[in-house]
Image (spheres, coloured by chain):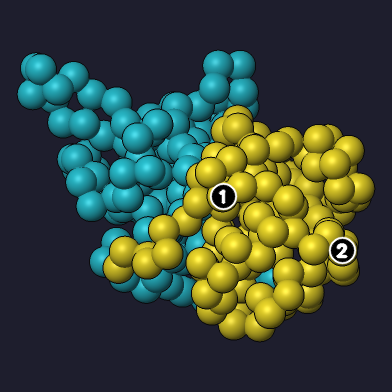
Amino acid sequence: MGVAVRSLSSAPAAETASMLEGDVESGEATRAFYHGLETDTQPPKVVSVQRQSGTIRGYPARGSRIPKVRAYGGRLPAGKRGIEFTTDVPPDGGGAPGLPTWSGPRFGVRAGVDDQGWDYVEIDVVVTENTQA
Amino acid sequence: MGIRQVIPWERWPSGDSRPIAVLPYELPELSDRYGLEYEEGIDDLDRYRLAAIELGAVGQAWVVKHEGDQNRGTVVYVDAAADIDEAQSLLVGALGIERGQLVWAAPTSIPA
């Protein structure tokens, strides 16, 4: 882990406007937060692995053959079970507001094939909150 | 032009989709207005509901809402190779709304 957090200035403004937090006046870097909610496909065990490895992995969505990491923009809502994270890697351009994706391969987005033969991509993250552990 | 709901493609023709707009309606209102019925699914983001509609030369558009998506409105996806401007025009025409009513419209040129 140990991903440095800095401004995601290359992220599309429409996607990041609601995700950014930081104290501009004090000079604190503005950073974007994202979150994922616990589902049947993101059980606590997987999240625990993600937390330890500092990576989040994504697979193709329905109808697609392009693997993407996907998340919700912004902080983890109070009372929800899931993880909150930040990353150096800017989301893909052209995404819907509040629904960032990371596809590649490109800088910061690694592509691979898992032990089941499924294509995936993964990004380095810093988990800032985990309500599933 | 009206709305014709169709069975979602197994695969997008180009191999991927892209969002083109966020409609100003939630799923129940879309059902009331256009008679849409939704399939339920789950992916590695969250549970979701989806309806596919025919969209002329663009083929299909998928109306999708993930359960944990707290943003206003409903996202519409089309094939990643489709012309965005054409798809948006067909979409608002089919729905009988103005482009300005969209909560969000994808830029017609995607930044690299």
Q: Position of residue A41 (x, y in %)?
A: 69, 49
Callout 2 environment at 10 Å: few (<14), some (14 to 19), or many (20+)?
A: some
User: Residue drawn at (81%, 35%), measured in percent from left and top?
Assistant: B29
Tint of chain B: yellow
- Horizontal side of residue B8 vs A128, given as left or right: right
Return the chain for callout 1: B
Query: Does residue B87 sit above or below A26 in this rendering?
Result: below
Helix, strand or loop at label 2? It is loop
Disc 2 residue type (three-letter): Arg
Query: In the rendered image, which quarter is residue B90 located in?
Result: bottom right
Q: Position of residue B60 (x, y in %)?
A: 73, 70
Q: Which mark is residue B4?
A: 2
Query: Does residue B50 sit above or below B104 in this rendering?
Result: below
User: Residue drawn at (83%, 35%), measured in percent from left and top?
Assistant: B28
User: Residue drawn at (41%, 58%), measured in percent from left and top?
Assistant: B107
For disc 1, the marked residue is B99
Return the chain for callout 2: B
Tint of chain A: cyan
- Horizontal side of residue B98 vs B47, given as left or right: left
Disc 1 residue type (three-letter): Arg
User: Residue drawn at (31%, 64%), measured in percent from left and top?
Assistant: B111
Query: Does residue A16 sit above or below A121 in this rendering?
Result: above
Q: Position of residue A110 (x, y in %)?
A: 37, 68
Query: In the rendered image, which quarter is residue B53 located in?
Result: bottom right
